[in-house]
Image (cartoon, grey):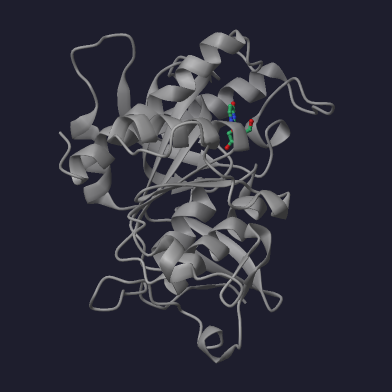
Amino acid sequence: NERESDMKPQTRYSDGSVRLRNPHIELMDQDILYHLALGSESHDLIEMFQDIKFVCIGGTPKRMEEFAYFIMREIGHKIPTGTQLLDISQYSYRYSMYKVGPVLSVSHGMGIPSVSILLHEVIKLMYHAKARDPVFFRIGTCGGIGIDGGNVIITEEALNSELKPYHEISVLGKKIRRPSKLDRRLREDLLSLAHEKDNAYDTVVGKTMCTDDFYEGQARLDGCICEYSEKEKMSYLCELNRNGVTNIEMESLAFAALTHHAGVRAAVVCVSLLDRLKGDQVLAAKEVLNEWQLRPQILIAQYIKKELGLI
Ligand code: R2B
Ligand code: URA
């Protein structure tokens, strides 16, 4: 019952606004974006979100709040003195969402199920808002394969744990596969914006393996269960390395597959927290980790500033 999804990637409307691959939505009286605490009738989504050009998503609510303040300074967006950015989705108690001019900064939680739910609703949000040609970025963390903590990896291709470039999901009890493609042009533009002068860290392009677990799913020896040897672990990680895998994380597959299928341009930029060929535990100090997590944000900010004509 397995088959490649034979549908072509979704195209946008001629004005660049998002078209949904779902005939049911426009027949509904209202569409409640439950996990965002927004709705098409309860909120004026066009008024609130039509100007969005960049949708940036990342795991934690705190990091995405910080990104919102960071991008606000970078693009010179002003809010009244003494006021704070509002977490638009605070009453969902699931995800958090901040809007800074044309930038939306949203948390997606951990793993494919969480990022999938978020993306279904954010892509619908862009559709209801009639936002034009929004670009999506995942700003994340990962384990490097032969890449030390602190270095930045732009995903060339998202692979499942069998190293295949598709996301397999169950729909009506049947397995279907969707290609986990990311936008090549976007990736190349990002790479060209990566700093070269500063040698503090590198920015590289590589294949990203996406797993459903942090421990056994990523060949760690330090989960509550481990039924393989260190030798088996190392031979597996070395095989990943030989296959061009530069990093492992837990969302890129669904992120790439859903955005591609919805006809939305997207890229994944992650910072490595450790080289998995050297260990399993994330040992770096909190302050160091915080500084590292800014690095993908800096790259995305460069892209946004360039697109806005600010650099
Ligand atoms: C990277 O970090 C998280 C696990 O610690 C997960 O969300 C991911 O992809
Ligand atoms: N996120 C992951 O999924 N794996 C790591 O090793 C580090 C961060």
Occupied quadrant, residue 244: top left
* Total numbered labels: 0
Give residue 89's position: percent from left, percent from top.
Answer: 62, 52
The relative height of residue 9 versus residue 309 in the rendered view (above or below) is below
Give residue 271's position: percent from left, percent from top.
Answer: 45, 26
Q: Residue at x 66, y 15 (%)?
A: 281
Give residue 93's position: percent from left, percent from top.
Answer: 73, 49
Q: Residue at x 67, y 59 (%)?
A: 35
Residue furthest to the front in view is: 81
**Which image quadrant: the N terminus?**
bottom right
In the image, taking residue 195 as reference, residue 237 lies left or right, namely right
In the image, taking residue 311 as reference, residue 167 lies left or right, namely right
Occupied quadrant, residue 13: bottom left
The relative height of residue 34 versus residue 255 in the rendered view (above or below) is below
**Which image quadrant: the C terminus?**
top left
Residue 145 visible here = no
Residue 112 visible here = yes
Occupied quadrant, residue 222: top right
In the image, taking residue 175 as reference, residue 197 lies left or right, namely left
The relative height of residue 278 versus residue 107 in the rendered view (above or below) is above
Front-lying residue, 46 or 131? 46
The relative height of residue 22 versus residue 234 in the rendered view (above or below) is below
In the image, taking residue 206 as reference, residue 139 lies left or right, namely right
Q: In what quadrant does ligand 1 lie? A: top right
